[in-house]
């Protein structure tokens, strides 16, 4: 996985509440092509986004994929309706095998470049069995790299004892740093760490909030003003400085925001500014 380090989270290219088709499908296809043209080399999706519609949209927009583009998807969640309460974690071996193969079909690939177990919370199979299923799929050539999402540090360690883990994705940003141990472990193992909601200044489960608490704004806004940057760009620059393993995946339906996010890679914060943000 190479530069640029900022990817694109495609989850918002779905219907309301991430259920169903993106309302303006042609605009979604156009945006995805513009995202790649702007320099993004990592696009993140999942079979539960839609469900399925997000993967299909990506295929219709970008297939055949440029060699430098990595499409990451996830499996292990089911969803039976528009309410978030209908989402559940499934880890049964045959279900995960089906999920990976159907994601590959929807994406139009023989082998998925990066495939995450979407949750460490399934109870119909042990966590180790679920990771073992992904290891089988890698051996069979269905997936190339294995990632983990929504897991604990203990689960990451358990998975690493079974198979190489190439990526870990978790909620991590300026305000919410409770997954720092996962970041440290990913860095140590040579895996990439992929923060979701990276420009949000809120906690997991809340809608993205780029304004954040007043105490955070008092720190970030003067720094942004000195650099002629936005608060979101400062938040991304801080993340990129945390570790060379960090690859944020901000999501947006705006090309202007995509370009703004990518420009954050050129923002160099001073040691004093980084310390002020870190606190």
Image (tube, rainbow, N blue to C red):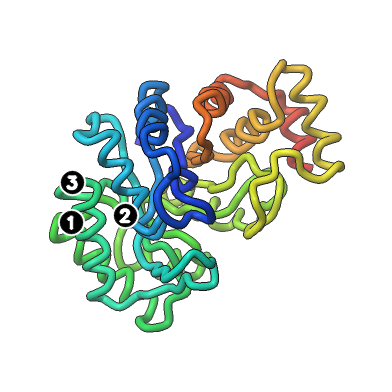
Residue receiving disc 3:
109
Q: Secondary structure at mark 1?
A: loop
User: Which image quadrant for residue 22?
Assistant: top left
Residue ID at (37%, 28%): 30
Residue receiving disc 2:
115
Q: Is residue 67 left or right of residue 268?
A: left
Could one spot residue 78 in this view of the protein? yes
Where does the image place residue 95, in percent across and percent down from the top left?
27, 73
Tell me, for residue 142, which label it has, or none.
Answer: 1
Find out whether the residues at labels 3 and 2 contact each other: C-beta distance under 8 Å.
Answer: no
Mark 1 or 3: in front is 3
Distance Cα–Cα, label 1 vs label 3: 9 Å
Upstream in the sequence, badge 3 or badge 2? Answer: 3
Q: Answer few, some or many: residues within 10 Å of disc 2's Cα (few below 14, many 20 plus, some between 14 and 19).
A: many
Residue ID at (56%, 28%): 257
Distance Cα–Cα, label 3 vs label 2: 12 Å
């Amino acid at each position: 996985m190479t530069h640029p380090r900022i990817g694109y989270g495609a989850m918002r290219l779905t219907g309301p509440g991430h259920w169903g088709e993106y309302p303006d499908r042609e605009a979604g296809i156009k945006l995805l092509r513009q995202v790649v043209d702007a320099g993004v080399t990592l696009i993140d999706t999942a079979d539960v986004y839609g469900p399925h519609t997000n993967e299909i949209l990506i295929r219709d927009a970008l297939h055949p994929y440029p060699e430098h583009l990595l499409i990451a998807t996830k499996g292990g969640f089911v969803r039976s309706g528009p309410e978030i309460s209908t989402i559940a974690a499934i880890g049964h071996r045959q279900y995960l095998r089906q999920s990976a193969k159907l994601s590959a079909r929807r994406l139009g690939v023989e082998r998925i470049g990066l495939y995450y177990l979407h949750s460490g919370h399934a109870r119909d199979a042990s966590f180790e069995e679920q990771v073992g299923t992904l290891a089988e799929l890698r051996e069979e050539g269905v997936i190339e790299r294995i990632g983990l999402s929504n897991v604990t540090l203990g689960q990451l360690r358990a998975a690493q004892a079974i198979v190489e883990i190439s990526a870990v994705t978790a909620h991590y940003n300026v305000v919410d740093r409770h997954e720092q141990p996962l970041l440290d472990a990913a860095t140590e193992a040579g895996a990439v760490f992929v923060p979701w909601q990276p420009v949000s200044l809120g906690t997991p489960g809340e809608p993205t909030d780029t304004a954040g608490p007043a105490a955070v704004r008092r720190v970030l806004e003067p720094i942004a003003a000195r650099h002629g940057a936005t608060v979101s760009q400062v938040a991304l620059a801080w993340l990129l400085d945390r570790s060379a393993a960090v690859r944020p995946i901000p999501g947006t339906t705006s090309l202007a925001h995509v370009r703004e996010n990518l420009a954050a890679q050129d923002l160099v914060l001073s040691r004093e500014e980084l310390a002020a943000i870190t606190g």
